[in-house]
Image (tube, coloured by chain):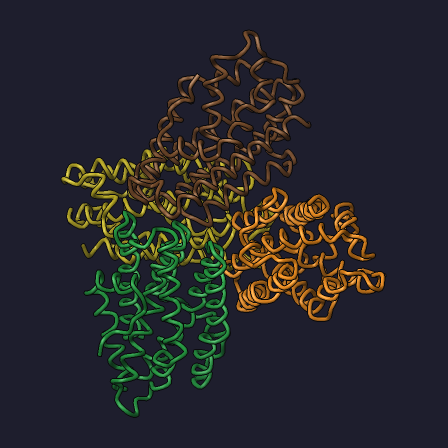
Chain colours: A brown, B yellow, C green, D orange
Amino acid sequence: MTAPDYGRAFALWRDAAAGPWHAYTRHAFVEGLKDGTLPRKNFLHYLVQDYVFLVHFARAWALAVTKAQSLEEMRAAAATVNALVNEEMQLHVGTCAQAGLSEADLYAATERPENIAYTRYVMDAGHSGDLADLLAALMPCVLGYGEIGARLAVEATPGTPYADWIATYGGDDYQTLCRETGAMLDAALTARIGPDFAGAPRWPKLAAHFTRATELEVGFWDMGMTP
Amino acid sequence: MTAPDYGRAFALWRDAAAGPWHAYTRHAFVEGLKDGTLPRKNFLHYLVQDYVFLVHFARAWALAVTKAQSLEEMRAAAATVNALVNEEMQLHVGTCAQAGLSEADLYAATERPENIAYTRYVMDAGHSGDLADLLAALMPCVLGYGEIGARLAVEATPGTPYADWIATYGGDDYQTLCRETGAMLDAALTARIGPDFAGAPRWPKLAAHFTRATELEVGFWDMGMTP
Amino acid sequence: MTAPDYGRAFALWRDAAAGPWHAYTRHAFVEGLKDGTLPRKNFLHYLVQDYVFLVHFARAWALAVTKAQSLEEMRAAAATVNALVNEEMQLHVGTCAQAGLSEADLYAATERPENIAYTRYVMDAGHSGDLADLLAALMPCVLGYGEIGARLAVEATPGTPYADWIATYGGDDYQTLCRETGAMLDAALTARIGPDFAGAPRWPKLAAHFTRATELEVGFWDMGMTP
Amino acid sequence: MTAPDYGRAFALWRDAAAGPWHAYTRHAFVEGLKDGTLPRKNFLHYLVQDYVFLVHFARAWALAVTKAQSLEEMRAAAATVNALVNEEMQLHVGTCAQAGLSEADLYAATERPENIAYTRYVMDAGHSGDLADLLAALMPCVLGYGEIGARLAVEATPGTPYADWIATYGGDDYQTLCRETGAMLDAALTARIGPDFAGAPRWPKLAAHFTRATELEVGFWDMGMTP
């Protein structure tokens, strides 16, 4: 299947990061979700770390609110903070509750270094640059999960115990969010750099943020394989 | 009437800032809202500046999300960002629309120096300190409007054209928000400093943020009187 | 006399802010320094506020260190922090000591709202954007003092009691700093936006930071006139 | 030998992090510097990563300048930025030049994930908290190198090719810096929390920053062993 269309900047960054992008979106962890062979223990370990990841991801989108330069950017970022805190994090809470873990347990979980590296890199991309730098570092997670979800919704082995996870990211709500976020990204780049944003001097730096965050996603899946 | 109870830290800071607090909460602008004598022109001028203020106030609460150190703090701050962007700012939009001003006009309005001084002071209180510093600078607006609203709900001249404004800040929803915010503040101070927070070495610095932000509120009302 | 040449971006921003720039660089306070008619009381009042200003200006240049994206940018910003803390602030300390004010007095001086508005605006320009946004807000002070100093070095009434102030900003060291800073600015803009930086979508936003900071300089001189 | 005395807070944090602290200060990499058995290839690999580390460490100390709340704190942080940029980084430049690496090569070196995790964690400790949080995350590097240097200055095998490195961190200049930094730390904690800072509610959080940064130092040495 072809990758979903999340806009112009994403397509360019994705191509520029082809190797790491493949390693990320076709990772053994992902394939294990798809065919159901991923051990439950690994999945739960991943979920706990991912909960802590989402705490910091919500912080990063909140940082985006402080760096927005239009009403649309501010609203989109604020809506994402809200969705993360009140929806996506609650999915993890629900699943982990079945395994006997409370939300307080999740919040207090010890972060693995791979998790620290990724989340703090994103925060620093934001603090050291402007909204475009921050968005470049945020996109591999947001849109990569969309691409993985869309593929797995088609390819998953019937009966995989990870059908809920796949339905979340492959479902219409999340796919719509990805298309809207991709459009917001293109608009943010156009507003700051112009319609030919890919030819600007700062483009390689933005692409480097995207590539680096993609590599850190690979590290995150690797961590998921070794609970 | 007695001032509403928004918690322990607020009561202490309010007393320590008695002079500026009176100048703020009993300002001629406020009395003009109460008895209806405030010229419409002044009110609209204020609303436009206040819209821009709320943009930056939402940014400041988003900064609070990035500085939260508990799930409760993060959720409270995220909910406030959401309420500001999707509710309080929309009240201004509605009222200003009747006067022929679009939301784009509001967002693009030229900030008055009094507005810049206040909002950027709050942002910097957050960036230079921790969440407690930021909250100290945020409280005069949040809780002062609550106190003003509660008083005017009782004392307002029947038929004042500013009954909607008074109903917003004097109403149950906003008063509940104030009590919850005051409780969150006390909890945040207790978690960082301990139950005797008012005796800590950093207390005068926190009180100074509160007093300064109160003085900047006075400047904001002054500005409202001179469109 | 013609204005000194501090580079390409400065010349463009200066022209775009022509009215405020004239109000700033030809302010009655400046003319009073030039011909010696400025009351000593006003000058000391200004010096005290300017000391506090420099504390925050050093903070803003330190923020620039955190946002640099080349070794040259980092070094230039770090050198400026050092020069501010260890040289420019010490000039104020020396002069104020003659008037019986210790450095601790200066550091603890109550900031005037005009001072808060300016310094916190600059900090927020940095936090909300990238280094280019921050530099745009920093330049009116750095380069405006250079332009004022260069003019007053030529035009000052012999015997003005403010000859030291004029010698500081009109002297070779400060003029060299201005040319180097202007060159660093042009390089920073070229690296991020390209050689035609003035045609980029973000240019008006950068020019607006420069204009706004210039207006806040006018407010600062106004404050100096009313001790 | 007994560990050097760098003040009260350091001694407490060091004890609370006993396991990781031992793993850090007695790491095989350190022992290889001591007896000269560390392969040159590993040392150069470490130096390149450490140069990039210092770039971000200088950014973190610059962030400390923006978060200082006394003249002494601001000056100490500014002096450290200056020492890092103009002295410590130049040591690396000199050594690497002998191996054919230019400073531009160093600045552009690809960061290893262990490096990213550590430096961005420190930056975020600062952004999410106040100066005390930032200092807690900065101390393991500053003072740990002091403790390692002091020990190796006594214990090193004569003729170890890493005598220069040992002389740098074990020498009087660096040891003085460590004692001054430790004193500044104690003063910063006392000013914010009081003389009994170790009994404050926020103490465990500060100790956790110190422990985490110590663990990330262990990861950094591990990385040094696998070029």
Furthest residue in direction bottom, as rendered:
C159
**In the rendered picture of this protein, how many numbered marks are placed on residues?**
0
x and y, in percent, of residue B182 in the image: 46, 42
- Residue at x 50% of width, y 59% of height: C71
- Of residues A74 and C99, the one nearer the viewer is A74
B15 relative position to C23: left or right: right
Furthest residue in direction front, as rendered:
D100
C78 relative position to B178: left or right: right
Quadrant hosting residue D114: top right
A29 relative position to D225: left or right: left
Task: Say if B100 sits above or below A49 in the image.
Answer: below
- Quarter of the image with the N terminus of chain A is top left
x and y, in percent, of residue A103 in the image: 59, 28
Furthest residue in direction top, as rendered:
A158
Task: Say if B29 sits above or below D94 in the image.
Answer: above
x and y, in percent, of residue B202 in the image: 55, 57
x and y, in percent, of residue A179 in the image: 37, 26
- Residue at x 34% of width, y 34% of height: A184
- Residue at x 36% of width, y 52% of height: B119
- Of residues B171 and D186, the one nearer the viewer is D186
C142 relative position to D18: left or right: left
**Residue C86 visible, this orientation:** yes
Task: Say if C113 sits above or below C94 in the image.
Answer: above
